[in-house]
Amino acid sequence: MEGRGNRDPVCRRPWDPRTTGQSAATATSLEPIEFIRINSTLLEILSPKEKESIYRVEEITSNDELPQNQLLYAIYQAYMNDRLQLPHLPEIAVKVRKAVLDPECEVETVARIIQTDSALAAKLVRAANSPLYGVQTPIKTCRNAVVFLGLKVTRDLITSYSLRLKKHMLKLWKHNAHVGATCYTLARMTPGLDPERAMLLGLLHDIGVLPIINYASGIPELFNSEELLNEAITALRTQVGAMVLRKWEFGDESVNVVMESENWQRDPASKSDYTDLVIAAHMISGMPANEVEIMRRRIPALKKVARGMLNKKLATDIRQEAEEEVREVLQLIS
């Protein structure tokens, strides 16, 4: 394979023994170069399986002038070296979840763990006394709150309380909560889809934003500019989200939801799937019900969910139900 300079078409073509007929090749550079080895898992994440397309390849380095490229480089390097900092649960939440998994777990054990954080204990007692659970006699202790709520509800509440959201993450959390709650309601109306799984995927569809904000804190140009940070989030969140779910060993279906959740014209099959639910949930939670009915003619996912019966009234009912659920959750964790 011969070519002169990086403008020579021969040098720009990928070398592949299947197309060149050569099992080896030698390249000589007149200038310093950077050799990048791309992990096959990352290629799988970034390459859509459903369709072929022509990719434009650009070189990025840690010294790239564009802050967005610096960010992608930092995340990519961390991922390749198995050092990608992912969202994690605080220590107390982890201990509670681990304790509840034990078949012989006792209420006293869980209560003692929670009481190591007085703020968490107070929130749990407050939750147990809320109208949501219909308590008859006021609950005054952490132990009694655990007994009344049960181990599983206690576990889930403590997990929610422990996710201490920074101020600039609250908007994202509310958005994901609305999408997740809407997915849950839509799944109950859509045959073949599990509401609990639908809600989880709705909550996770923007998971890539969390590492982006985390790594952006090391790039002042991004972190100090809301506009640039939002541009980076828009450009990178699906790829980074796919990395996170691969790291957590979620399946291809979950990764596809992250990659395709804003592909409004997506229409791979007549039967609805979880990605359709997330797309539809975006629409229902983000625009007036009458516009949802209009967009139904243009957005394939809106035609397939809820047995194909989505209209203005149903969209309004679904949105109201989701908003009520989110309000209840916000009251508990505020």
Image: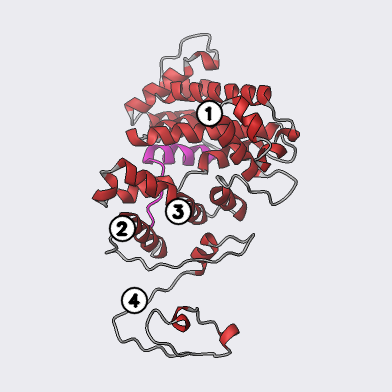
Which amino acid lies under the numbered mark 1 shown in the image of this protein? Answer: Val
Whole-number angstrom distance, CA of label 2 to CA of label 3? 18 Å
The local secondary structure at tag 3 comes to helix
Callout 4 touching callout 1 (CB < 8 Å)? no
* Quadrant in the picture for the C terminus: top left
x%, y% of residue 226? 31, 41
Tell me the residue at 62%/33% (across/down).
Answer: 184
- The span from disc 3 to disc 4 (Cα, nearest Å) is 23 Å
Looking at the rendered image, the disc whose residue lies closer to the viewer, 4 or 1, is: 4
What is the CA distance from the residue labelled 2 to the residue labelled 4?
18 Å
Asked whether residue 87 is in view, the answer is no
Q: Magenta stretch: residue 93 in it?
A: yes
Q: Which mark is residue 274?
A: none
Tell me the residue that label 2 is attached to.
Answer: 66
Q: Which residues are magenta?
A: 84-103
Task: Give 332 or 273, whichever is nearer the viewer.
Answer: 273
> Quick one: label 2, few (<14), some, or many (20+) residues within 10 Å?
few
Q: Amino acid at mark 4?
A: Glu
The residue that mark 1 highlights is 153
Query: Tag 4 or tag 2, which sits nearer the N-term?
Result: 4
Name the residue located 51 percent from the left edge and 13 percent from the top edge.
131
Report the mark closest to the observer, 3 or 1.
Answer: 3
Q: Secondary structure at mark 2?
A: loop
Residue 34 is tagged as 4
